[in-house]
Image (cartoon, grey):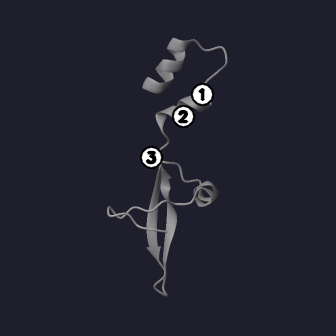
Amino acid sequence: MKVTSKGQVTIPQKVREELGIHPAETEIDFVRDSKGKWYIKKSGSRKESRFRTARKAVQPTMSTDELLALTRS
């Protein structure tokens, strides 16, 4: 895995799925154990995006205005 000049790496999709890491929603921590090894740990706090939250609340009978109101609240 390569590190970009900005210090970024791409977490493989399988790892993201297994850890439940979602772009722009999930915080991760870097943890060092007693032997000096580093690990990536999903942080306890997760702010869900307003769109993901709205998607869970959508009903098939909602109007466009009702759908838009969900994303704006």
Of tags 3 and 1, which is closer to the observer?
3
Q: Is residue 34 above or below residue 61?
A: below
Calculate the distance from the C-alpha at mark 2 to the C-alpha at mark 1. 7 Å
- Looking at the rendered structure, the secondary structure element under dot 2 is helix
Q: Is residue 73 visible?
A: no
Crowdedness near tag 3: few (<14), some (14–19) or many (≥20) residues, C-alpha within 10 Å: few
The x and y percentages for residue 11 are 52, 60
- In the picture of the structure, the residue carrying the numbered disc 2 is 53
- Looking at the rendered structure, the secondary structure element under dot 1 is helix
Q: Residue at x 54, y 34 (%)?
A: 53
Calculate the distance from the C-alpha at mark 3 to the C-alpha at mark 1. 20 Å
Calculate the distance from the C-alpha at mark 2 to the C-alpha at mark 3. 14 Å
Looking at the image, residue 38 sits to the left or right of residue 61; the answer is left
The x and y percentages for residue 51 are 51, 32
Q: Observer-nearest residue: 54 or 15?
A: 15
- In the picture of the structure, the residue carrying the numbered disc 1 is 57
**Could you tell me the amino acid type at mark 2?**
Thr
Q: Quadrant of the C terminus?
A: top left
**Could you tell me the amino acid type at mark 1?**
Ala
